[in-house]
Image (cartoon, helix red, strand yellow):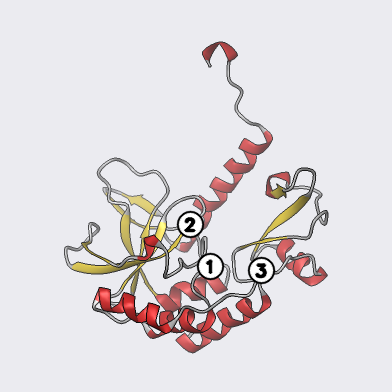
């Protein structure tokens, strides 16, 4: 997908109020099965949390069961320019358009692109610790619900990940993923984007493939469901 294609597709999701991976359903609707994906608030009022890209989400979308998200507000141009001045580097054109024409964060992968007014939005100059020793200018794009981050290198427009999965002490968790911003968002639009993953390959560690990311994510989801239905039992005498 080109930058224009990606922007148009994100715009359609934003206009429809379906711009995050997890969308609440209507109160009291479609509550059977998969209890670990139910939310209760206030007490006694239940709703389902739908995950974009799943068959259940598509059914909910077709039946009008999704509670659409509120409209987004674009970032002020002066805010974007201020951050670019601090970084001494312009944002990639696609990222600028997303913030200036769609919203000041809160949409997209993970927990959504972070707001430009967030304290965590600062651009930092650092040195990569995975496979290269060149300087980089990194800006956090999003955080993932189960941990981990995705960053954009403003020097060359490449995506970097920080894994939330456990790795041995001494193994750097930050790594280049070989994706541009447009390619990263294209995966998200196709419901193929998952949290960054490092995989041990012989004596070295490398970024996970899409298939490996999917397998790790599915295992985490199975464990989450198992913990919900069969919570750990603690010996009262040991507590």
Q: Are marks 3 and 1 in contact (CB under 8 Å)?
A: no
Q: Residue at x 30, y 67 (%)?
A: 123
Q: Quadrant of residue 44?
A: top right
Q: In the figure, is residue 153 to the left or right of 208?
A: left
Going 32% across and 78% down the picture, which residue do you hit?
82
User: Mark 2 against mark 1, which lies toward the viewer?
Assistant: 1
User: Badge 1 is on which residue?
Assistant: 106
- SS state under label 3: loop
Place residue 83 in its image quadrant.
bottom left
Residue 2 visible in the shown view: no
The residue indicated by pointer 2 is 144
Q: Residue 127 at what x, y percent from top left?
A: 20, 62
Marks 2 and 3: CB-CB under 8 Å?
Answer: no
Q: Is residue 218 above or below residue 50?
A: above
Can residue 54 be seen here? The reply is yes
Q: CA distance from mark 2 to mark 1?
A: 12 Å
Secondary structure state at the residue bearing disc 1: loop
Q: Position of residue 108 (x, y in %)?
A: 53, 69
Q: Are marks 2 and 1 in contact (CB under 8 Å)?
A: no
Q: Position of residue 218 (x, y in %)?
A: 57, 51
Residue furthest to the bottom in view is 4
N-term mark: 2 or 3: 3
Residue 177 placement, left or right of 46: left
């Amino acid at each position: 997908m080109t930058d224009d294609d990606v922007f148009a597709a994100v715009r359609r999701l934003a206009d429809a109020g379906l711009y995050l991976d997890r969308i609440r359903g209507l109160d009291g609707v479609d509550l059977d099965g998969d209890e670990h994906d139910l939310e209760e608030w206030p007490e006694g009022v239940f709703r389902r949390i739908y995950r974009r890209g799943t068959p259940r989400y598509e059914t909910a979308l077709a039946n009008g069961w999704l509670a659409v998200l509120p409209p987004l507000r674009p970032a002020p141009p002066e805010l974007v320019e201020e951050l670019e001045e601090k970084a001494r580097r312009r944002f990639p054109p696609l990222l600028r358009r997303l913030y200036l024409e769609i919203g000041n964060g809160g949409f997209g992968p993970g927990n959504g692109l972070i707001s430009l007014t967030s304290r965590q939005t600062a651009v930092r100059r650092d040195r990569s610790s995975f496979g290269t020793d060149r300087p980089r200018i990194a800006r956090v794009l999003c955080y993932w619900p189960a941990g981990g981050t995705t960053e954009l290198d403003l020097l060359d427009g490449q995506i970097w990940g920080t894994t939330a999965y456990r790795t041995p002490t001494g193994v750097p968790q930050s790594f280049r993923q070989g994706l541009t911003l447009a390619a990263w968002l294209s995966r998200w639009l196709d419901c193929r984007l998952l949290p960054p993953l490092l995989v041990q390959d012989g004596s070295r560690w490398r970024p996970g493939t899409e298939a490996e990311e999917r397998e790790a994510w599915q295992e985490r989801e199975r464990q989450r469901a198992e913990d919900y239905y069969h919570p750990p039992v603690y010996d009262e005498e040991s507590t």
